[in-house]
Image (spheres, rainbow, N blue to C red):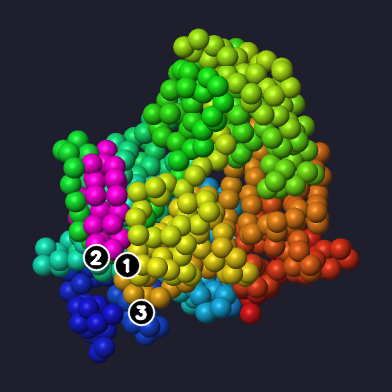
Amino acid sequence: LSYWSSRLNISRPVNRVPAWQAQETCQSLRYGSLAIFGAAAISELFRRTAQCSSLKRVALGKAEDFEDGAMREVPLAEDGGVILLHRHAGEFFATSPSCAHYGAPLKKGVSAAGGRGGAPTITCPLHDATFDLRTGQVVRGPSVDGITTYQVEVKDGMVYAYVPQDIIGTGKHPKVRKEMAKRNSRDSRVYALLGGGAASLAAAETLRQEGFTGRIVMITQEQHLPYDRVQLSKALDKPVDKLLLRPESFFEEFGIEVLRGTAVTKLDTKGQVVHIEGAKGKDELKYDKVLVATGGTPRKLFAPGSDMKNIFTLRTPEDAAEIAKLARKGQKMIVVGGSFIGMEVASSLSKKGCDVSVIAMETVPFERVLGKKVGASFARKLQKEGVEWFGSSQVRLFRGNERVNGVELEDGEVLPADAVIVGAGVLPNTRFVEGLSLDKNGAIIVNPLLQAEACENLYAAGDVCAYPAMRTGQRVRIEHWDVATQQGRVAAKNMLGKFQPFITTPFFWSGLFGENLRFVGHAPDALDRVIIEGDVSSMKFISYYTEDDEIRAVATVNRDPVAVACAELMRRGQMPRVSELMLGTVNAEVLLQRLQDLSKA
């Protein structure tokens, strides 16, 4: 603010504005970067914006026509683009209409006033990507970029937005990246990020966004820059260059070192040294603080014949490419494991015309996670899609010579196979950690700041992190992309001494045979009190997972944006009681309305 005050002389009246000042103001307004100013400052900048030739004041409609607590797409021109206008507690906000993650229309999501002192937000209906309506910056969720915000004013009962001319004509709204510091060679601090996934990338960006100018060294065993791993099971043959979350130039610009093809052989937590081995041989890195975000190692089946060719796990683009080569019409593909990854792979293979069979220990898909009722609906879906489900089954052995050609089950049945994909979950990749106790699964035990209990300069995020759940304090480990991303952001802030606890409500999504599944919250251990709203047989329903009189989690199938609305209500502590569901006084429409009413307050 002091910078802009001095450059634009906001603190005193100005009768004439030099062209260069008007141009700088104009450029700032394009990306909504002035939203942190006070009302007087913004008012002055509005006045000066009239001098910007590249900005146009667009009338959006009468203020009284926009409902409080809601949003609406408004056309900018007859043949041009649109803008998304939000109203909360009488205040208007204008944003780009599409999510910066995958481009989903934000009008189908949830626009909410800031709860518990937070900023007003817009949340994508698909993946819980949430953006600040004032700045456009990412609040939580998987998006690495923010959305564009535009300055709004209300005059004589009319709502106006200041929008660049090119956007009015093309309708193409730019994505926004938060301002980031760069490497300063005089800053001798070294922060090591172990792993090259979502958590490490989020941590690296957050460190720079928070002003850290020391060395950031990301170490990954893979040959690629951070990429969107969740796409692998959904699009097996998608090239890795289409999956990258940031280009190489990004890491170069902000001084983020990425050591690719480099394994961490030992993490000496007492000596604060990372021992690594790559193409250039062995080396050591002395660090000040370290984030362990090395993800998980796919579980393997130790059945006879498991080392034969054409038996795969899926973790990397190379794994996906190998599976895709064999995924031809008529090929017999066996998926072992009824996990979300396994089921997504089955869906992808089925779309390619393969004959797909799924072997799982559960009686129906997702039984341990979503319960029998929901699982039965997916079992019917599998049958409709021609995918065979072998429930309550285990693999006895794999048949074949060098290549697998069959899978024998414990009951003696033999399934012919051209290839097998094992999707039996992952184990935390922490075997290299020394001087630190782990939990029974091999995860790093952390406090609410994601800081290791026995080592104050070590933090963990993602699949390797066992953290205390906000509601119960029980240690949990969540293998979700969204959770890993947010944990990377929170861990980075705490590495800088921000003391921000991780309180994010877990959110998960999946696409299976054309059906959209969302899951939010922490399901109780016992899934015997599940309340279903909607028609399970038509794959359009909501499943409430309850304990005592509390809704602990919600799963939806083809009912967007109910899941993201429930996520917001959970964060605010405003979810209804189970008794309200049982009495029939609350349903999905009531939940959406309840959130809108909170936004009017």
Q: Is residue 350 something that shows in the picture?
A: no
The disc at residue 37 is 3
- Residue depicted at x 43% and y 73%: 500
**Of 443 and 481, which appears nearest the observer?**
443
Residue 74 to residue 410: above or below:
below
Q: Quadrant of the C terminus?
A: bottom right
Residue 246 to residue 315: above or below:
below
Nearest to viewer (mark 2 / mark 3): 2
- Residue depicted at x 47% and y 62%: 445
Callout 1, which amino acid? Asn
Measure how far apart labels 3 and 1 are at the Cα level.
Answer: 36 Å
Task: Name which quarter of the figure residue 321 lies in.
Answer: top left
**Of 143 and 489, which appears nearest the observer?**
489
| Residue 434 location (% of width, % of height) | 34, 55
Residues drawn in magenta: 250-277
Measure how far apart labels 2 and 3 are at the Cα level.
Answer: 36 Å
Nearest to viewer (mark 3 / mark 1): 1
Q: Is residue 417 left or right of residue 593?
A: left
Callout 2, which amino acid? Asp
Residue 418 to residue 580: above or below:
above
Mark 2 — residue? 288
Task: Name which quarter of the figure residue 525 lies in.
Answer: bottom right
The reply to whether the magenta stretch includes residue 412 is: no
Mark 1 — residue? 457
Mark positioned earlier in the residue sequence (1 or 2) = 2
Mark positioned earlier in the residue sequence (2 or 3) = 3
Q: Check if mark 2's residue and mark 3's residue have beta carbons within 8 Å.
A: no
Of all residues, the one furthest to the top in this rendering is: 401
